[in-house]
């Protein structure tokens, strides 16, 4: 039985019927639909539209639907309901008879789907933040293990200066901390109850919307019924938040794939997360990282799909809005799965603690330290830079390194060079020189690590509290 058959003389064209149904994908909103329906039934009772007895019967029916759905997923999947709202309506009438129809007094699917989606996004935000906490914990743990291990930092993908490998890992932790914060910021705008907005003009009965908001743990009620039923900004904002997570994952995945090549050789792929080639027996491929990188497309695509769907949409509810759901669900699932894989991979990977510092000691990575040495002796930095640059060219011609030059050779470029130069350009000294907040000096990184531990513990606590 359709929800709206009264006005129609003919049944739907079967192909159209199949094509317009959302139940195949919106059935995942059943827990949200049931929660919102419970809050609505109580509001109807309070408004005098349901008796105490009727309310009890309806609440009992809703509870049974939830239980049976949890025990028998096939029972849900087999339904030919148009959407999740229709499904609950049909099952409730089956269970409690015509009384079930009273739950729809003054209620529209337009506000129901808006409410369900907000409840869903709120749940996904805490889930995603909890998985972000897992991943950040993995970054922090691996950074802690690497201790004083150095590696080259790159700019323009050219070796630039030595840094601690822990400093490099903590750079990613920063990205994911921002992502967690961004999602929690977007939650403020998710936290609004649409229920009571009716189809478009507001419910035609005096419902206590504040009580419904309290029951569903929403901070506020919507201020305008047209906006409430048609607003999907919160979903778009969430998708943009997920887009950032995917972007950051893809950047890290790219670096891991590069660092696992024999050209870099900084990391060894864990067997558990790599795959072989059916053709080339020697191959071990970073498929996990490639998939992380590749999945970014669909997550960013979801935000684009939603933006384009919303563009030019007249107020208020239009069926176009149904198209927001599949990209939303897909992006949310994709990011959760990606975060889980990333954390597992990161915990399993092996860092080559010999090749990383070895790479940091070649390629003139101490040239900036050498220029700094001269600058500390009063040479204007531009002149110091030029002198060391000329010394590098000289080294390249002679096949030498800066620290292998004799004092006489060095003094051809600047007279200020002294014996203590050789200490100043050692890896340890070059690292220690970056003794500034946020810099790579070991003592600074130690403090950054301690701070990251505290921050991730706080994030974990918040995510758990909202779960
Ligand atoms: N399945 C619909 C959606 O996702 C529910 C709302 C339908 N409302 C309507 N007036 N047809 O948008």
Image (cartoon, rainbow, N blue to C red):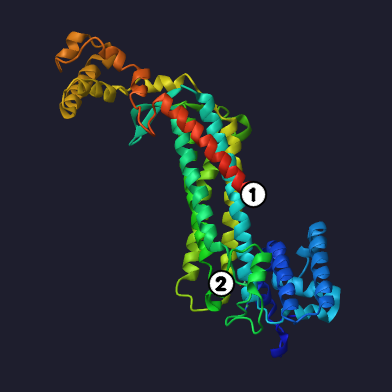
| Residue that label 2 marks | 222
Residue 447 visible: yes
Instruction: Give the spatial CA distance, label 2 vs label 1.
Output: 25 Å
Residue 376, position in %: x, y? 22, 22
Give the percent coordinates (x, y) of residue 280. 55, 31
Q: Give yes or no for contact between labels 2 and 1 (Cβ–Cβ under 8 Å).
A: no
Percent x, y for residue 146? 51, 24
Left or right of 103? Residue 285 is left
Look at 47% across and 35% down and name the residue there: 170
Q: In this view, does 93 lie above or below 213?
A: below
Q: Which of 10 and 246 is in front in this view?
A: 246
Quarter occupied by residue 428: top left
Q: Does dot 1 land on a helix, a strand or a loop? A: helix
Q: Does the residue labelled 2 lie within 8 Å of ligand 1?
A: no
Foreground of the two, 94 or 440: 440
Secondary structure beneath dot 2 equals: loop
Quadrant observed for ligand 1 in the rendered image: bottom right
Q: Which residue is drawn at 56% across and 73% down?
A: 228
Estimate the x, y position of residue 68 in percent, counting from the top left: 83, 62
What residue did someone put label 1 on? 465
Crowdedness of circle 1 by 10 Å Cα count: few (<14), some, many (20+)?
A: few
Q: Classify 254 as above or below 428.
A: below
């Amino acid at each position: 039985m359709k929800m709206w058959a009264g006005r129609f003389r003919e049944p739907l064209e079967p192909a159209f019927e199949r094509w317009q149904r959302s139940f195949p994908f919106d059935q995942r909103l059943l827990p949200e639909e049931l929660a919102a329906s419970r809050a609505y039934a109580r509001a109807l009772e309070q408004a005098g539209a349901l008796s105490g007895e009727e309310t009890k019967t309806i609440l009992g029916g809703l509870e049974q639907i939830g239980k049976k759905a949890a025990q028998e997923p096939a029972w849900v999947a087999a339904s030919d309901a148009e959407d999740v709202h229709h499904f609950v309506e049909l099952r409730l009438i089956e269970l409690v008879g015509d009384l079930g129809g009273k739950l729809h007094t003054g209620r529209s699917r337009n506000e129901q789907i808006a409410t369900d989606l907000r409840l869903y996004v709120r749940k996904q935000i805490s889930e995603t933040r909890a998985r972000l906490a897992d991943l950040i914990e993995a970054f922090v743990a691996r950074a802690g293990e690497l201790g004083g291990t150095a590696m080259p930092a790159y700019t323009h993908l050219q070796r630039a200066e030595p840094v601690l490998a822990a400093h490099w890992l903590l750079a990613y932790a920063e990205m994911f901390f921002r992502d967690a914060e961004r999602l929690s910021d977007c939650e403020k705008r998710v936290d609004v109850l649409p229920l009571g907005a009716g189809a478009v003009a507001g419910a035609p009965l005096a419902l206590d919307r504040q009580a419904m908001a309290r029951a569903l743990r929403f901070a506020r009620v919507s201020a305008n019924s047209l906006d409430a039923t048609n607003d999907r900004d919160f979903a778009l904002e969430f998708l943009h938040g997920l887009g950032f997570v995917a972007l950051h994952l893809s950047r890290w995945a790219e670096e891991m794939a590069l660092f696992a090549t024999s050209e870099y050789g900084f990391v060894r792929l864990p067997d558990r997360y790599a795959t072989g080639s059916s053709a080339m027996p020697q191959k071990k491929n970073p498929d996990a990282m490639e998939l992380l990188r590749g999945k970014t497309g669909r997550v960013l695509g979801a935000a684009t799909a939603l933006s384009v769907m919303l563009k030019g949409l007249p107020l208020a509810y239009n069926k176009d809005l149904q198209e927001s759901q599949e990209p939303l669900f897909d992006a949310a699932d994709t990011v959760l799965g990606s975060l889980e894989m990333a954390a597992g991979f990161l915990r399993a990977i092996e860092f080559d603690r010999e090749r990383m510092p070895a790479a940091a000691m070649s390629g003139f990575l101490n040239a900036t330290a050498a220029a700094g040495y001269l600058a500390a002796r009063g040479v204007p930095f531009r002149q110091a830079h030029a002198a060391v640059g000329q010394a590098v060219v000289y080294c390249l011609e002679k096949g030498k390194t800066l620290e292998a030059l004799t004092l006489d050779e060095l003094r051809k470029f600047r007279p200020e060079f002294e014996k203590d130069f050789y200490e100043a350009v050692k890896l340890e000294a070059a690292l220690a020189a970056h003794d500034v907040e946020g810099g790579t000096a070991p003592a600074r990184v130690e403090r950054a690590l301690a701070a990251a531990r505290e921050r991730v513990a706080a994030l974990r606590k918040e995510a758990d509290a909202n779960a």
